[in-house]
């Protein structure tokens, strides 16, 4: 941890990041709730470089670089998870074409799947979110032919054998039954291609409609299809925490 004489006072950096007012930020420092580069700061007046300092408050990463972009897109059905398409088919890149930042999508959803897709220019975070070793949970709502037997959840949690190996869900629950169909929630950290569709088809319930509703602690909520919003500070902090940053 270095005190950068050319840097900005820590309490001002925290205030600019929306953590608290400068006075409240000073209180956080006095209480030993702020760390810089892994070491707790208790003295006022420290200066840091926002471009390089790793700052945590109460153990949660605070994003202080103003060049970082974190977006949530509700990807509509029929849109490809690519930033460009040589055949001019609708793609994710169409929704951010007017932005100066060079963004990329975190993982992908197949064209027929709707829902939450993250976009960022933070390569380190994106890489970790996509890496299976960090086991970031993703939640899907699937409409399938019903009724769904009571044993389906257990079979999916125990694991089903697919052509590329065993696959398990982290949790499964029935949400609703209606007119020969069922709505089920599937939570898993797997990232293999079409994994949710393939698992549900393997247990006899091919997907009719699929929507991703959550990634880690980021929720789709009532966001309209095709709309984009910026993630708030707690959401970004939670994503960092989920991958150990």
Image (tube, helix red, strand yellow):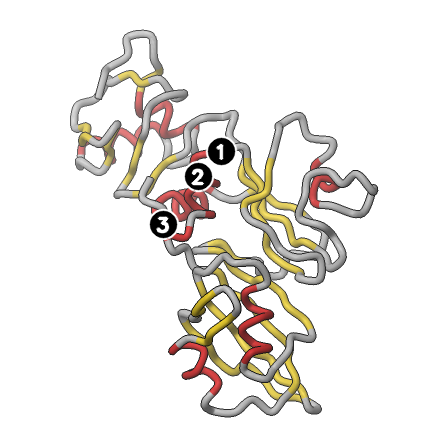
Q: Residues within 10 Å of mark 2 (few under 14, many from 20)?
A: some
| Residue 122, label in figure | 1
Return the x and y of residue 26 as percentages of the image width and height: 26, 29
Q: Residues within 10 Å of mark 3 (few under 14, many from 20)?
A: some
For the N terminus, the image quarter is top left
Q: Which residue is mark 2?
A: 125
Q: Earlier in the sequence, mark 2 or mark 3?
A: 2
Q: Earlier in the sequence, mark 3 or mark 1?
A: 1
Cα–Cα span, label 3 and label 1: 15 Å
Q: Is residue 118 above or below residue 221?
A: above
Return the x and y of residue 207 as percentages of the image width and height: 65, 75
Task: Determine contact: label 3, label 1, CB under 8 Å.
Answer: no
Left or right, residue 244 beside residue 189: left
Task: Determine contact: label 1, label 2, CB under 8 Å.
Answer: yes
Q: Which residue is mark 3?
A: 242
Q: Regarding mark 3 in the picture, which secondary structure is present there? A: helix
């Amino acid at each position: 941890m270095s005190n950068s004489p050319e840097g900005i006072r820590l309490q001002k950096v925290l205030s600019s990041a929306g953590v608290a007012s400068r006075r409240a930020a000073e209180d956080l420092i006095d209480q030993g709730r702020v760390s810089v580069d892994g070491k707790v700061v208790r003295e006022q007046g420290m200066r840091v470089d926002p471009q390089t300092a790793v700052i945590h408050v109460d153990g949660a990463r605070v994003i202080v670089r103003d060049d970082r972009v974190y977006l949530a897109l509700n990807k509509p059905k029929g849109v490809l998870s690519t930033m460009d398409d040589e055949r001019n088919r609708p793609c994710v890149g169409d929704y951010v074409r007017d932005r100066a930042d060079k963004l990329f999508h975190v993982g992908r959803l197949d064209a027929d799947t709707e829902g939450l897709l993250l976009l960022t220019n933070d390569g380190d975070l994106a890489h970790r979110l996509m890496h299976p070793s960090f086991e970031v949970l993703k939640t899907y709502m699937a409409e399938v032919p019903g009724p769904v037997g009571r044993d389906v959840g257990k079979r999916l949690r125990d694991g089903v054998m697919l052509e590329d190996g065993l696959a398990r869900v982290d949790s499964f629950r029935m949400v609703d039954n209606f007119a020969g169909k069922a709505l089920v929630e599937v939570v898993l950290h797997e990232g293999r291609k079409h994994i949710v569709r393939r698992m549900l088809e393997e247990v006899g319930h091919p997907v009719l409609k699929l929507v991703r509703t959550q990634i880690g602690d980021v929720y789709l909520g009532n966001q309209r299809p095709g709309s984009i919003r910026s993630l708030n500070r707690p959401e970004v902090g939670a994503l960092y925490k989920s991958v150990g940053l």
